[in-house]
Image (cartoon, rainbow, N blue to C red):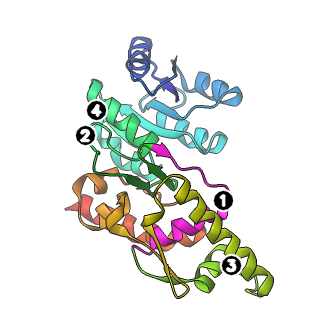
Amino acid sequence: MRIVCVDDEALLARSTAALCRSLPEVDAAEALTSGRDALDWFEKNEADIAILDIDMPEIGGLQLAARIKVMRPDTRIIFLTGYSQFALDAFKLRASGYLLKPVDETELANEIRYAAFGEDQGRSKSADRVVIRTFGSFDVFAGGRLVTFRQKRSKELLAILVDRQGGSISRAEAFALIYEDRLYDRRMQKQFDNIIRSMRDTLREYGIEDIFEMKSGQMRICPEKVSCDLYRFLDGDAEAVNRYRGEYMSAYSWACAMEGFVTNNTIGANKK
């Protein structure tokens, strides 16, 4: 994992980068001292996570984050600041994390691990064999390993099942969500069967095929067999509510309905 730390105070930038490098999952951490330097760096390089000070001259952290997201959409943003009043603006930019100075090593580690893996790795997760992240991008982890799908549409199919929260969906309904206006004719039915088969093969490869059920043409995921941030959010888990940064399954247009619901409920919770 590669991280970039940007802070106009050079000592803080270097110390934050040093803390990042001390984590076993971090391969490299760069320390930069201005938004301009960061933009120049991102023109030639990629990073998994950018840790940004908010209050910087010329290009502030919020503006910098928006520009980084255009240049490198997959980069996750963690804001590090001495001012708690910026939290709402950070939320609007769909940040993956928000920390107050002075930097707490444990909190920094937890925010980095959540941004990267979708879970607070600072606590024991031995009971969570399958972890599913829906806030931000959609990812599945089996025994701590990222599940890699052979076909992007087989991954999207699983995302649809997760979004249904255990409710059943037919082949035709799932097809309509993935292919939108395409006709569900015989040729496409065969193609969609291949997508289902590919998804099952991937789950079987990682030893987690039991999270999926299919009966009489109806498909569903077994919610009781996974740990999912959306499900914890809907159960009122405070940590899951606080972890939501305004983005849900960002790659899929059909996910906008649930994203709106979750965002509205998060804003409502924050006003209480």
Residue at 63% of width from left, 29% of height from top?
Answer: 39
Mark 3 or 2: the one toward you: 2
- Lower sequence index among marks 1 and 2: 2
Quickly name the residue at label 2.
123
- Lower sequence index among marks 4 and 3: 4
Name the foreground residue: 95 vs 160.
160
Q: Secondary structure at mark 4?
A: helix
Q: Secondary structure at mark 3?
A: loop
146 part of magenta stretch: yes
Residue at 38% of width from left, 14% of height from top?
Answer: 15
The amino acid beneath tag 2 is Arg
Name the foreground residue: 216 vs 223.
216
**Spatial distance from mark 2 to mark 4, Cα to Cα?**
12 Å
The amino acid beneath tag 4 is Glu
- Lower sequence index among marks 3 and 2: 2
Q: Secondary structure at mark 1?
A: helix
- Percent position of residue 229, x then y: 36, 57
**Residue 180 disc label:** 3
Residue at 27% of width from left, 28% of height from top?
Answer: 106
